[in-house]
Amino acid sequence: MTVFCALTIIVPLFTSDYFPFSPMPMFSDSPRSLILFAAYLPDGTRADPARFGLQINYVANVHPKLSAHPPASLNGCTGVMGNTCYGDNLAPVDRLVSEDTLRRHVEPYLQKQSDIPWIRIEEKILAVDPASGGQRVAITDRGEWKIANPYYRG
């Protein structure tokens, strides 16, 4: 009985992934930049970026044994970063996403929301500021787009 209890405690320590105490250290990939999106409705209200697939699906531990699977995002991945990615809408992390790429990504979400005539999307690149000698993080670039909803029924 004692051996069974000991194995019940010890075996999961070596066979499971207990975030943040996982085998792969957090931020092991040393990201140098990150894309941040904000979405605004026509009345100026800020919308949840996930409503349009603009959330960030960044997971530092790229090989967890157990994980949640977030919805598709413009960073190109569902689930864990690098696990299930699609190529056409893969966003760069060091420069602004093109308006065409953004439009192609957002349109399927707009199709399900035909009461919205358009959305305004702000994009910011958050990166290590070269002027600080690598000591600060700053917004290094920004863009803004107004995406019309081709499925609008108003």
Image (tube, rainbow, N blue to C red):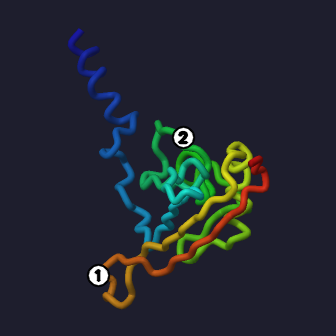
Is 1 in front, or is 67?
Answer: 67
Which residue is disc 2 drawn over?
69
Which residue is disc 1 drawn over?
135
- Classify 10 Å Cα crowding around label 1: few (below 14), some (14-19), many (20 and above): few
Q: Which mark is residue 48?
A: none
Identify which residue is drawn at 40% across, 34% down: 15
Answer above or below: position of 16 versus 24. Answer: above
Q: Please report contact status of discs 2 and 1: CB closer than 8 Å, yes or no.
A: no
x, y (%) of residue 81? Answer: 54, 53
The answer for how far apart the CA atoms under marks 2 and 1 are is 34 Å
Answer above or below: position of 144 versus 4. Answer: below
Identify which residue is drawn at 62% across, 59% down: 119
Is 132 in front, or is 25?
Answer: 132
x, y (%) of residue 49? Answer: 53, 53
x, y (%) of residue 76? Answer: 63, 57
Q: Is residue 23 left or right of residue 91?
A: left
- Classify 10 Å Cα crowding around label 2: few (below 14), some (14-19), many (20 and above): few
Q: In which quadrant is the N terminus drawn?
A: top left
Which residue type does callout 1 highlight? Gln
Identify which residue is drawn at 54% across, 70% down: 93
x, y (%) of residue 97? Answer: 62, 71
